[in-house]
Every structure is written in C-alpha cells, then in structure tokens.
Amino acid sequence: MSARYRIAVIPGDGIGREVVPEGLRCLRRAAETHDFALDVVEFDFASAAYWERHGTMLPGDWQPTLEAFDAIYFGAVGWPAVVPDHVSLWGSLLRFRRVFDQYVNLRPVRLLPGVRGPLAGRAPGDVDFVVVRENTEGEYSSVGGRVFEGTEREIVLQETVMTRHGVDRVLRFAFEYARGREARHLTSATKSNGIAISMPYWDERVEAVGRDYPDVDRDKYHIDALAAHFVLNPDRFDVVVASNLFGDILSDLGPACTGTLGIAPSANINPERRYPSLFEPVHGSAPDIAGRGIANPIGQIWCGAMMLEHLGEPDAAAALLSAVEAVLAGPADALTPDLGGAGTTTQLGTAIAARVGS
Amino acid sequence: MSARYRIAVIPGDGIGREVVPEGLRCLRRAAETHDFALDVVEFDFASAAYWERHGTMLPGDWQPTLEAFDAIYFGAVGWPAVVPDHVSLWGSLLRFRRVFDQYVNLRPVRLLPGVRGPLAGRAPGDVDFVVVRENTEGEYSSVGGRVFEGTEREIVLQETVMTRHGVDRVLRFAFEYARGREARHLTSATKSNGIAISMPYWDERVEAVGRDYPDVDRDKYHIDALAAHFVLNPDRFDVVVASNLFGDILSDLGPACTGTLGIAPSANINPERRYPSLFEPVHGSAPDIAGRGIANPIGQIWCGAMMLEHLGEPDAAAALLSAVEAVLAGPADALTPDLGGAGTTTQLGTAIAARVGS
Ligand SMILES: CC(C)[C@H](C(=O)O)[C@@H](O)C(=O)O
Ligand SMILES: CC(C)[C@H](C(=O)O)[C@@H](O)C(=O)O
C-alpha cells in the first residue's frame, strides 16, 4: 500500500498565490511518478484578504485544524498596504514556528546551473552548504520595554532569551545533519567577543554538545567575520548553525551570494514530528511584481522537494530537484524574467513538472 | 603658525606592531608636505606583552594619560595564545569606546584601483559608501545573566540597551554626514519585523530625527535583506546607519564585498571632541602572518587619513589617500602578497610615503 500525506496549503499573499499552484503541480507529478498520494486542503487564512474580512490573520480553530496535517505548504505572507508587517508576521508565520515548535529552520545555499550569481569565478559544485537556524527563541523575543517613555531620558530594553533546551536541541540537530553529509563539518556563528552573556553561552553549548560528535569537524566564526567569509570563501562551508537572528542574516546572505535569493527554499521543522513542519520559499509576497504572472515558482517547487524529503520520500524529492536543475540548465528563454527569460510562472512550472521522474 | 597635534600611538599586538610604523611614516610625510606638526608618543599598553608583565591590559592612569592627546592611532589588539579575547578587547578597545564616548564608528566601503574584489563586473567608482555604526550601546552590553545555572532548565538572558540619547546622537551624526555628501542618501538597518521592541524603537527615532533632515533621502532595510543587497546592489548605498551589532556585521561585510577587508580603516569618533577619537584598521593582529614582515600597511595608512580628516587637515588626508590609490594602481609586484605582490610591509609603506604630496 502506498503512503498518503495530508498537506495543508496556505498560499497567503501576492506572488504566494501565483507560485503555490505551480509547486502543487510539481508535487502531484512527483506523487504520480513515485507512488504516493497527497491529500491537499487549501486555506485562505494567513493572508491580507482574510485579515480584511475578519480583522484577524487566523480563525479561532487554526491550531487543531493545522495539526491534523502532516505538513504545511506555505506561499508568502505580507501585504503592508493592507496589514502592517508585524501584525501579519507575528499573527501567522512567527506564531506557527513557536506553537508548532518548528525549532529548526533549514536553508540550503547552492550554486545552480544556469543561475548567475554575483560572485566572480564560481561554478556549480563549488558552493553547497546549508544553514541551520534556531527558529523559536534567542534574539526574537517580545520581552522588554521602555522606561521614561517619550522623554529625553527614554531607555529601551530588549531581551535575548536562550535556553539550554532550545540551544541544545538545535545544535544536536545540526551535528546530526552534519554527520549525515560527506564533509561532516559544522561551523558555528557566534559573537562572544562583543555580546558578552548570550553568545559565550552559545559557544559553551557547542562545546558541550560537540563532545557527543567527535566525528564531526567543527569551527566557529564571529558573525562579522562569518558574513565576510560567505562572500570571500563560500566553498569553505558545509553545515552552518546559528541563533535565530544570525541564522536569519546568514540564510539571506548565503543565497544572495549564489544568486538564488529569489528561488531559495526554507523548511521550518519540528524534527520530532509532533507538529506539522512548514515549508516556504525565502522570498516574500513581492508586491512589486504580484499579479503579473511572472513570479519565479522555483523557490516554491524547491520547498516541495524539502517537504517530500521530510515526509520520507527522498527519491521523489531528488526527482523534483533534478527536474529544477535540468530546466535551469536548459534554454534561458523558458525561464522567468528574473533569470533572463521571457516565460511565465505557469510555463516554468509546467516545464519543470514535465521533467519530474522522466 | 602651523597646527600641532598630539597623537597617542598604541601598536598593540601582532601585525599592529608592523603596520603602525608605516602608518607613522606616511603621517610624518603628510605633516612635512602640508605644514603641520605631530607630537607622537608611543605606548606599550593594550597589548598581550603588557598583559604578560602586568596582569592587566592598561595602567591605572590610562585615562588621564590618553585624554591629553588629540587622537589615538591604534594598531591591533588580541593575542589569544596569551590573553583571552574577551579580556584583551573589553580591557582596551571596547573600554576606550565607552569611556571616551566614541559613539560613532565610521567605516568606508570603496572599490579601489588594483584591488580585486569577489564581485563580478564591478569597477572602482561603482561602490563608494560609508557605514555609520553606533559604538557604545545596543546589543553590546554586559547586562543579563543565567538562572537555573548548570541544569537542564538553564535560561540565559542578555539585554539589548538602547537609549534616546544614544540612538538620536548617532542618527544625527549620520544625517549630517549624509547631508555633506553628493547623494544625500541615508539607509537605516533594522529588523523591526522580528526583534519586536528595540528595533521598532530604532525605526521610530529614524523617523523623528529624520524630520530635521528633509533634504536627505532615506530608506530602510531589514538586516537580512540589507546584507543581501550589499552583495547584489552595493552601488545603491551612500550612508548606512546601524546599531552596534548590525553595524559590526555590515562594516565587515561591506569591505569583504569590495575586496578591502584587509585594508579597510575604522574611525571611533567622539564628534564633540571632548575625548580623543581612535583610529584602527578593521583587520586584527593576524597571528598567522605576524612577524614575517609581509602585513599590508594600507589599512593603517588609510586610518591615518581618517585621523587627519578628523583633526581638521582634509588636504593632507586627501593626499594620503591619493598616494594609496596611486600605488595600488601601479605595478602589482610592489604590493604585499595579499594583493598579489612580493613586497614587504616596509617597502609598501615607503612607496606610499614617497607619493604623499608629490
Ligand atoms: C573585536 C570586536 C569586539 C569588535 C567589535 O565587534 O566591535 C570588532 O569586530 C570591531 O568591529 O571593531
Ligand atoms: C519576515 C521575518 C520576520 C522572517 C524572519 O526574520 O524570521 C523572515 O526574514 C525569515 O527569514 O523567515
């Protein structure tokens, strides 16, 4: 009997609504060719349109509703003309990460055929690493406040909150992940020379957890130097583990260096599978090009590959990625304008789907 | 009567001791050709050698001693084999920044002739901007601590501290600085979508202070997107203002993008001139190449130009920079190995000095 996966689909805002159908097209094709089934249910919440009608980002029962699924396939959220970003983000994505304990944010950084990056003299194969970002605590907190508010003496405090539980589990995930790769190398992002309490603690835990992984090589860089090395020596990295903020920065910077910012995927994972994990492209809702049918669907499709990997369909995941690479390596005019082509979202999605498993 | 400036020189550790003499050589030449005098006093503290002898980084009277000077010309500090980084840094550089209220850290990012950067298709003139970093507060604090220490329940808190006073003054400096440039453009680094208390405050103050500068164009980016734009669109920036941590990251990333990380300068400024400002290259003490006489002295020399600018000798500052550019644009073999040459620190310093004011 073949497996069946229940997928909650949330297209969200802007180009999210345009690229999700292409992602689904490719996922369906992967299911057909790899003998599993997808039960897909689409939701209209976590969007500006929902907020306009209901004055809230999510329905009251969003939690049990989404918990019934194996994974969440997410487009993009954010439409500042209608709803302020902090409302839409903290009301959906950032909330999901915490409530569903998606404590790992995984973002691959790869040079791909046919994708021109900003770095001189680098070719596909040179750069292939992954950023493992802590996704629930750290610098992203709403703890703190103001004193002497509105006066010249105003002071604002904002807490970074790290816990043994929270730090250790993401480190352990990163070490395990590195162990599963050929290079078995883990780089830790720190700033213990300037941020005197939380970052030395992070370093300490890397040491402590690392003792269980003597087979994984490790090094660490201060975040300023690490950002510089992403540009200067991106071939040096294998798995990079970082706090919430540092991981956020590095997982935009990495894809920028490989020219893949517009097509990079992101997996928000609850490794224990107690809650559904969420898969979303790194790009946002892109109000500037939304509605024109020219958004690049590759980020959304690549997310689908990460989702299949997580669900336990590695062959189908690999087939999806190969299809993406094959189309990228083919004639440029079939691609969307961001990649120098003249194709539409649907044309590119259809071309990739046609290659899946063929 | 010609001006006289009192300069405290602190070579510090490693290559600091090698490049500072070359910086002084060029400064002396600038003084000769531009009719001012330098009183130079060299100090051995703020170094691992001093720490080894005295068990402390600084003498008891360091503060009045240094306050008697118009500026501090600093090499590099840090020699982890002898003294832990947090001791040497918090015991010297980070302490100077606070005690001497050097609340602005200024770091230029420029493509230079003869310097090969990692970005494809960029040429000198394309990129020329400056990062204005808050240098005394924000994310760099020692406030916070641990509860349930050493147990599974361990929680670590670290405060970010922003004050109206501290934020407004660096913003005002940045706006004034932008006003003095041709493009009159200011970019603010934020992360108000994820860091929910301090960064919205930063944004608010940019708005408020910005009202006094209607002639300065401004925009803002979240730090993740901004880091990406440094790589993808570095020609977009003019003046970039950032908190302590964000400024730290951006002012390493910027020079990395222009290939100038090893030669970039940094000015730690007390704009009111109540305390001496400090000028140091962005590079560190570089234990890996220290003692071999091949360190590149350009960062130290460029620092000298920033110091002269600050002291009120803009012509001499410009002459120093022109000399650097002229030598960089000349035959590569006169340069140090990091720039593809075979020259020594002294040869390169001497070559640049010979060009000053000629
Ligand atoms: C050494 C370190 C504490 C320092 C900083 O982060 O401020 C350095 O990176 C710098 O940029 O001057
Ligand atoms: C939108 C924003 C809050 C979010 C983050 O910083 O986590 C985004 O940048 C990301 O990386 O998913």
Image: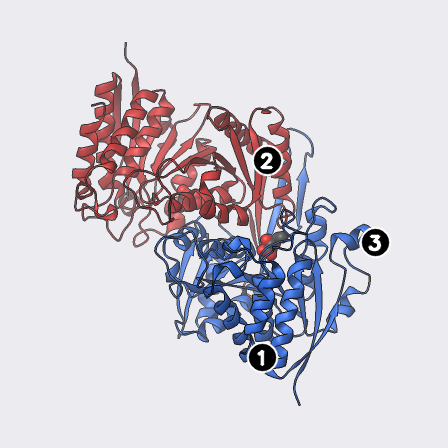
Chain colours: A blue, B red
Looking at the rendered structure, which numbered label has been put on residue B208?
A: none
Percent across and percent down for residue B282 are 36, 41
Q: Which residue is mark 3?
A: A54
Up/down of B299 relative to B64, above or below = below
Judge whether residue A30 can be spotted in this image: yes
Which chain letter matches label 1?
Answer: A
Q: Chain of mark 3?
A: A
Residue A19 shown left or right of residue A190 in the figure: right
Question: For residue B111, what is the image quadrant?
Answer: top left
Above or below, A283 relative to B211: below
Q: Secondary structure at mark 1?
A: loop
- Residue farthest along the bottom direction in this orientation: A1
Name the quarter showing ligand 1: top left
From this viewpoint, is residue B154 visible?
A: no
Residue under label 1: A313
In front: label 2 or label 1: 1
Q: Are marks 2 and 1 on the same chain?
A: no
Q: Nearer the viewer, residue A301 or B202?
A: A301
Q: Residue at x 40, y 50 (%)?
A: A228
Q: Position of residue B41 (x, y in %)?
A: 26, 28
> Residue beneath label 2, please?
B163
Are labels 3 and 2 on one chain? no
Q: Nearer the viewer, mark 3 or mark 2?
A: 3
Question: Three-letter amino acid code at disc 1?
Answer: Glu
Label 2 SS: strand
Q: Tell me whether the residue at label 1 lies in contact with that at label 3, contact meaning CB atoms closer than 8 angstroms.
A: no
Q: What is the distance, in whole Å, between disc 1 and disc 3 at their CAs?
A: 37 Å
Q: Is residue A173 above or below residue B162?
A: below
Is mark 3 in CB contact (under 8 Å) with mark 2?
Answer: no
The residue at label 2 has a CB less than 8 Å from ligand 1: no
